[in-house]
C-alpha cells in the first residue's frame, strides 16, 4: 500500500510535492497537468521516483500519462532522478537546456563533479546510481523554445547566472514561472506573519552574479503572478523580494572578493553569509537561530564553495 503523500495545488494544473531530498520541504517536484497528461518539472533524485508515482496515483494517473520530464538544469538535486524517471515514463521525452543535454546522455562528468563536492559515500546516500538517457528521447530547448503541451503554451527562457545550463519555464495560462535556482531559495517554514525571506543560490561551478541579476530581471519582465521555486514551492515575487534577492547577490559576491584569498576562506565566508541571512530573517520575525542555522547549513556551505570558485576564475 502506498502511503498518503501531501500534494499541494498552487495554481490550475500545477501541483507541488516534496522530493524527499536532503530534508523535509527542501526540494520541490512540480506536476503540470493538462487533459490528463503530465509534465514533470524537476526530478529530485532516484529516491524521489516513488514520490512521483505516489503523486500521480493520487491524481488518478500513472507514469504512462507523463509526456515530458523537464529539469531546469542538470545539478543532481534537480536532474538526478531523470534517468530513472525516463525508464519508468516510457511515453515521455526529456526536455533540457542545450548545454546540459550531453550530461543527461552521458552523466559521467556530473557524477565526478558531485563526488568531488560530497565524497563518494554521501554521493551514494543522496543520489544513488545516475542513469544515462537515450539521446533519441532528448529534446534540447533553446532560448524562447515554445512547447505546445496539450494546448497549453510553455516557453523556455535561457537564464544563466546560477548555471550556464539553466532555463526557466513560463506557463502562460497561469502566469507562473518555474525558476529552478535562478530566483533563489526560500523555505516556507521560515515564513513569518506573511513575510517571506529569500536568499541566492551561488553553488559551484558556474555562478555569475551579473548574469544572475540579468536573469532575475528577465523573469520579472513576464510579470509572473508566482515563481515556482525548487527550494521550496511557489511564492509571489513582490518588488521587495526582488530587491532583497538582488541585494543579497551583491552582498555575497562582495564577500568572495574580500575574503576568498584568505586562509580559511570558506569558513569565514560561511560565517559572514550565515550571519547576514540570520539578520534578514530576524528582521521579519524569525528568531530561532538554531533552527535557521540547521535549515540553511547546506545552502550556505555550498554557496561559500561556489563563491570561492567564482572568485578564483574571476581573478585568473
Image (tube, rainbow, N blue to C red):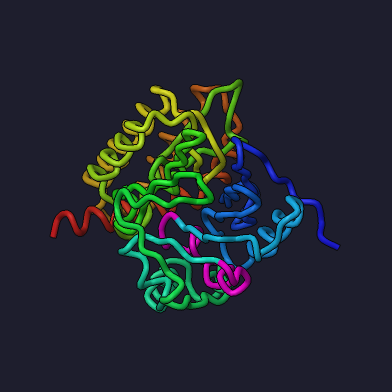
Question: Do we see residue 141 in this rendering?
Answer: yes
> Where does the image place residue 97, in percent across and percent down from the top left?
36, 60
Q: Is residue 224 above or below residue 202?
A: above
In this rendered view, identify the residue nearer to me: 210 or 134.
134
Q: Let me know if residue 2 is in the magenta part.
A: no
Residue appearing at x 44%, y 53% in the figure: 301
Tell me the quarter of the picture where residue 232 sits: top right
Q: Is residue 26 visible?
A: no
Q: Along the line of sight, which residue is nearer the eye, 191 or 298?
A: 191
Segment tinted magenta in the rendering: 72-91
Residue 79 part of the magenta segment: yes
Depth order, front residue of 107/259:
107
Q: Of all residues shown, which one is farthest toward the right?
A: 1
Judged from this view, the residue extending furthest toward the front is 151
Query: Residue 58: image x %, image y %?
Result: 76, 52
Give the answer, above or below, for where 124 lies relative to 28.
Answer: below
Q: Residue at x 70, y 56 (%)?
A: 56
Residue 315: image quadrant is bottom left
Could you tell whether 166 is left or right of 180 in the image? left
**Quadrant of the rendering where the N terminus is positioned:** bottom right
Give the residue displayed 73% in from the left and 46% down from the top.
Answer: 6
Q: Quadrant of the C terminus?
A: bottom left
Percent from the top left, x then y, of residue 187? 56, 39
Residue at (70, 45) in percent of width and height: 7
Quick one: which residue is furthest to the left in this view?
A: 316
- Tally of numbered discs: 0
Q: Position of residue 12 (x, y in %)?
A: 60, 36
- Left or right of 170, for residue 86: right
Amino acid at each position: 500500500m502506498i502511503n498518503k503523500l501531501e500534494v499541494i495545488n498552487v495554481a490550475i494544473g500545477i501541483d507541488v510535492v516534496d522530493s524527499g531530498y536532503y530534508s523535509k520541504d527542501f526540494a520541490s517536484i512540480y506536476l503540470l497537468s493538462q487533459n490528463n497528461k503530465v509534465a514533470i518539472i524537476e526530478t529530485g533524485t532516484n529516491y524521489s521516483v516513488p514520490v512521483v508515482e505516489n503523486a500521480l496515483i493520487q491524481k488518478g494517473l500513472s507514469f504512462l500519462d507523463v509526456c515530458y520530464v523537464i529539469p531546469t538544469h542538470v545539478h543532481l538535486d534537480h536532474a538526478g532522478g531523470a534517468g530513472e524517471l525516463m525508464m519508468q515514463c516510457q511515453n515521455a521525452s526529456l526536455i533540457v537546456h542545450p548545454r546540459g543535454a550531453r550530461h543527461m546522455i552521458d552523466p559521467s562528468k556530473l557524477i565526478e563533479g558531485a563526488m568531488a563536492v560530497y565524497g563518494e559515500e554521501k554521493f551514494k546516500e543522496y543520489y544513488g546510481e545516475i542513469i544515462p538517457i537515450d539521446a533519441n528521447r532528448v529534446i534540447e530547448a533553446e532560448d524562447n523554445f515554445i512547447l505546445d503541451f496539450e494546448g497549453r503554451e510553455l516557453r523556455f527562457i535561457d537564464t544563466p547566472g546560477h548555471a550556464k545550463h539553466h532555463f526557466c519555464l513560463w506557463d502562460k495560462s497561469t502566469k507562473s514561472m518555474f525558476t529552478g535556482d535562478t530566483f533563489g531559495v526560500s523555505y516556507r517554514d521560515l515564513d513569518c506573519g506573511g513575510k517571506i525571506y529569500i536568499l541566492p543560490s551561488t553553488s559551484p561551478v558556474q555562478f555569475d552574479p551579473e548574469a544572475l541579476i540579468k536573469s532575475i530581471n528577465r523573469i520579472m519582465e513576464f510579470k509572473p503572478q508566482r515563481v515556482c521555486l525548487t527550494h521550496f514551492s511557489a511564492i509571489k515575487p513582490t518588488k521587495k523580494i526582488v530587491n532583497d534577492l538582488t541585494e543579497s547577490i551583491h552582498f555575497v559576491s562582495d564577500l568572495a572578493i574580500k575574503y576568498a584569498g584568505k586562509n580559511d576562506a570558506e569558513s569565514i565566508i560561511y560565517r559572514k553569509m550565515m550571519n547576514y541571512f540570520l539578520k534578514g530573517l530576524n528582521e521579519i520575525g524569525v528568531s530561532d537561530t538554531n533552527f535557521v542555522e540547521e535549515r540553511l547549513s547546506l545552502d550556505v556551505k555550498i554557496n561559500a564553495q561556489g563563491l570561492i570558485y567564482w572568485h578564483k576564475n574571476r581573478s585568473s
